[in-house]
Amino acid sequence: MKKTNPPKTNPRIAEMLRVDHAGEYGAVAIYRGQQAVFRRNAKTKPMAAQLAEMEAEEQKHLDAFDRLLVERNVRPTAMTPIWNVAGYGLGVVTALMGEKAAHACTEAVETVIEEHYAEQAEACATEEPDLAATFLEFREDELHHRDTAIAGGAQDAPAYRALSSIITAGCRAAIAVTAKI
């Protein structure tokens, strides 16, 4: 029996899926890096537990994009190993800076991602309503993570504006690179 490949996915949709897969992969890596630091101290174990919950939601998103890439015959980004190291490193560094800096990282990343999901949902709502619904569902989780980070003192982090600006710019650059590579 000959195996048939799924039909070719619209290139714009393929880019969206590739970027979102990489983004969720990176988010999982960030939360794992932060947990690696916070798990080591009894005073920060509650923070590690909170991050584990957020990681679990990001893993659910990643699993969904893993399936979508296969179903739609879309290749993942070649940047995955780099995003893994960069994400984990960002998680470790911000956690070493303290809980508020870790929250500032979450706020910056999730702000970019929730805006990205909203734009994608709008762009594909007519052509791909089920995919748009997935983007909007995941956006709600990202908004929850962002709001949790703000409530945790993200904006009180040392050098908050600089830290947030650097992370935001990095996320936007990663999106642009991942769409193509």
Image: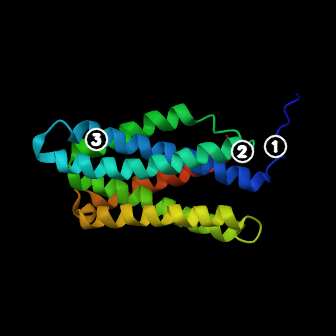
Residue type at tag 3? Gln
In the rendered image, residue 177, in percent from the top left (x then y), is placed at: 62, 45
Residue type at tag 2? Glu
Vertical position of residue 29 compared to residue 125: above or below? above
In the rendered image, residue 57, in percent from the top left (x then y), is placed at: 43, 52
From the viewer's perspective, tell me whether residue 149 is left or right of residue 14.
left
Which circle's residue, 1 or 3, is located before the other in the chain? 1
Q: Residue at x 66, y 71 (%)?
A: 122
In the rendered image, residue 45, in percent from the top left (x then y), is placed at: 17, 45
Q: Secondary structure at mark 3?
A: helix
Q: Secondary structure at mark 1?
A: loop
**Do the residues bearing badges 1 and 3 touch, measured as CB atoms within 8 Å?**
no
* Mark number, residue 158: none
Q: Which residue is mark 1?
A: 6
**Do the residues bearing badges 2 and 1 touch, measured as CB atoms within 8 Å?**
yes
Bin the neighbour count of mark 2 within 10 Å (Cα to Cα): few under 14, some 14-19, many 20 and up.
Answer: few
From the viewer's perspective, tell me whether residue 126 is left or right of residue 138.
right
Is residue 177 visible in the rendered structure shown here? Answer: no
Which image quarter is the C terminus in?
Answer: top right
Q: Nearer the viewer, residue 45 or 177?
A: 45
In the rendered image, residue 11, in percent from the top left (x then y), is placed at: 78, 51
Q: Residue at x 46, y 46 (%)?
A: 59
Which image quarter is the N terminus in?
Answer: top right
Q: Which residue is mark 2?
A: 71
Which circle's residue, 2 or 1, is located before the other in the chain? 1
Residue type at tag 1? Pro
> Colour scheme used in the picture?
rainbow
* Mark number, residue 35: 3
**Do the residues bearing badges 2 and 3 touch, measured as CB atoms within 8 Å?**
no
From the viewer's perspective, tell me whether residue 120 is left or right of residue 35.
right
